[in-house]
Amino acid sequence: MKVKISEEKYITITARAVERTLFLMLSAVMVAVVCKKSFSQGRSAVAKLDKELQSVSFPDKKTAVYVGDALEIQPVAVPKNAEVSYTWELADDGVLTVENGKIVAACSGETVLGVTSGDYSAQVTVVAKHKPLPEDSTLPPLYYETLPIANYCNTLASDFAADDLMKIPTRYVAENYTSLYVSAATFQEYLKMLDAMRAELGADMNMHIISAYRSYARQTELYNKAVKNYMAQGKTSTEARALALQTTQTPGNSEHQMGNTIDVSNDSTTDHNYQNTPEGKWLAENAYKYGFIIRYPADKEDVTRIEYEPWHIRYVGVNHAAYMYLHNLCLEEYVELQKKAAAEADDYALEHPATVE
């Protein structure tokens, strides 16, 4: 066979040579295919090996988050392309909860968050803190400790009752008053205040409880009785109800239903003259030191819509009571300032992320 390579020259190739050449070319092609396949299989094996999880960890040993915010943290897997399926583990302390698939800080505190994937696990300490107020803020620093309030625009359910009601011992109750109840926490603080009053005023001090917790049903009786008394004086139903509201809340709108409110007296009655008694004066000047407030102050009647009651005290805690006393606030005003403080803290936190101190 001749293969022309130019106009003058030819190369003579035998049939056997052609067969040998074709055989070598075919062999080379087959080797290339086999090598390519083997390389591809080897690469797949390496990729599969790379996806096998070797460890799990967190970027930091400790992290911080604001209460109410979702925790933005991701564990680190080695290798990066490892196939993982995480199971989160939260401590049973209520600091962190799961809401809509996100881990959220429910209250302040320090807790441990864990994560597991297969045979590997990791933990991180989480510090949950309340959003701070700017240093120059004059708003209530304890804005996040919401104080429950019952008044003309905040109604309690008919079955609402304090969880820790206790019967007040007879020696602390005014004569002819029986079966009075109050929350145990409130009564403990009341006793501390009573001891302090006695130490200052002396053995002649005279103060007894005439009213404390009232059920919804009991408040209904008192309100209806007040309305009937005014109607008996010739007032119309509308006039009687308006007058009754000056001293007696409608059912569900009385703080007595909360169990943290107490009416006191030194002669088993209540009238404005109590403010002039040694006990009444002492309460007005010192009750806040023990976490109590005069719930319906004389100069706040337009806000509370209740006449001045120097005998009506409500437990709110020392820090809250001190703020209200120093700033001359009634509870309605204080609660509104708390709401403003919460909004201010939210804005401040946007520019000042939570950090671990």
Image (cartoon, grey):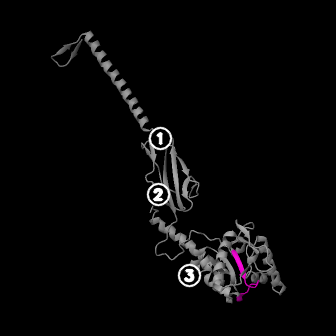
In the displayed image of the protein, which residue is found farthest to the right?
232
Query: Dot 3, crowdedness within 10 Å: few (<14), some or many (≥20)?
Result: few
Residue 340 shows in this picture: yes
- Residue under pointer 1: 83
- Residue 166 placement: quadrant: bottom right
Contact flag, marks 1 and 3 (Cβ < 8 Å): no
The residue tagged with tag 3: helix, strand or loop? Answer: helix
The residue tagged with tag 1: helix, strand or loop? Answer: loop
Query: What residue lies at 41% left-to-right and 38% top-to-bottom?
Result: 50
The magenta segment is 261-273
Query: What residue lies at 67% left-to-right and 88% top-to-bottom?
Result: 278
Q: Measuring from the top left, give residue 92's x and y in whole percent.
A: 59, 54
Residue 333 shows in this picture: no
Q: Nearer the viewer, residue 64 or 265?
A: 265
Query: Dot 2, crowdedness within 10 Å: few (<14), some or many (≥20)?
Result: many
Which of the two discs, 2 and 3, labels the residue nearer the N terminus? 2
Q: Nearer the viewer, mark 1 or mark 3?
A: 3
